[in-house]
């Protein structure tokens, strides 16, 4: 899936949990009650780390793909 480098989140997050920066967005993918969840947030340097969009997925890899898709789609609209 692309050449995006996902970094593990600290151990206080339920494993697996990863994040990456993509343009003005910080993407988080983690599990909540055993379900993969993704979030796209504006990075703190941009607007104070506001949640832009979030959702769930069937698999952890699908959650990562959804977060990437959402950030890329929103980046295209903001240009």
Image: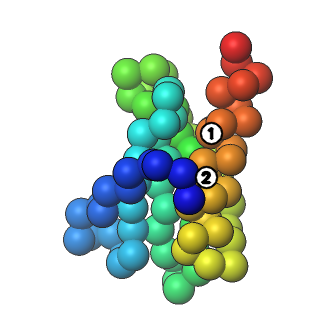
**Residue at (53, 40) in percent of width and height:** 41
Image spot of residue 47 (x, y percent):
48, 22
> Is residue 19 depicted above or below 30 in this figure?
above
> Is residue 27 depicted above or below 1 in this figure?
above
For the residues bearing labels 2 and 1, Cβ distance under 8 angstroms: yes
Residue at the top extreme?
A: 79
Q: Quadrant of residue 51?
A: top right
Residue at the left extreme?
A: 11
Image spot of residue 9 (x, y percent):
30, 61
Count numbered badges in the picture. Answer: 2
**Residue at (53, 85) in percent of width and height:** 34
Label 1 sits on a secondary structure element that is: helix
Label 2 sits on a secondary structure element that is: helix
Q: Is residue 38 left or right of residue 30?
A: right
Q: Which residue is mark 1?
A: 71
Q: Is residue 23 left or right of residue 9?
A: right
Image spot of residue 49 (x, y percent):
45, 34
Q: Nearer the viewer, residue 1 or 16?
A: 1
Is any part of residue 38 visible from this angle?
Answer: no
Residue at the right extreme?
A: 77
Image spot of residue 13 (x, y percent):
33, 69
Query: Where residue 67 is drawn, which disc sits there?
Result: 2
> Is residue 73 depicted above or below 35 in this figure?
above
């Amino acid at each position: 899936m692309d050449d995006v480098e996902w970094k593990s989140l600290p151990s206080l997050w339920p494993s697996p949990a990863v994040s990456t920066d993509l343009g003005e967005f910080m993407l988080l993918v983690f599990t909540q009650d055993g379900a993969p969840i993704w979030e796209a947030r504006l990075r703190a340097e941009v607007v104070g780390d506001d949640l832009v969009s979030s959702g769930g997925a069937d698999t952890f890899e699908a959650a990562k793909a959804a977060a990437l898709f959402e950030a890329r789609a929103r980046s295209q609209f903001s240009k």
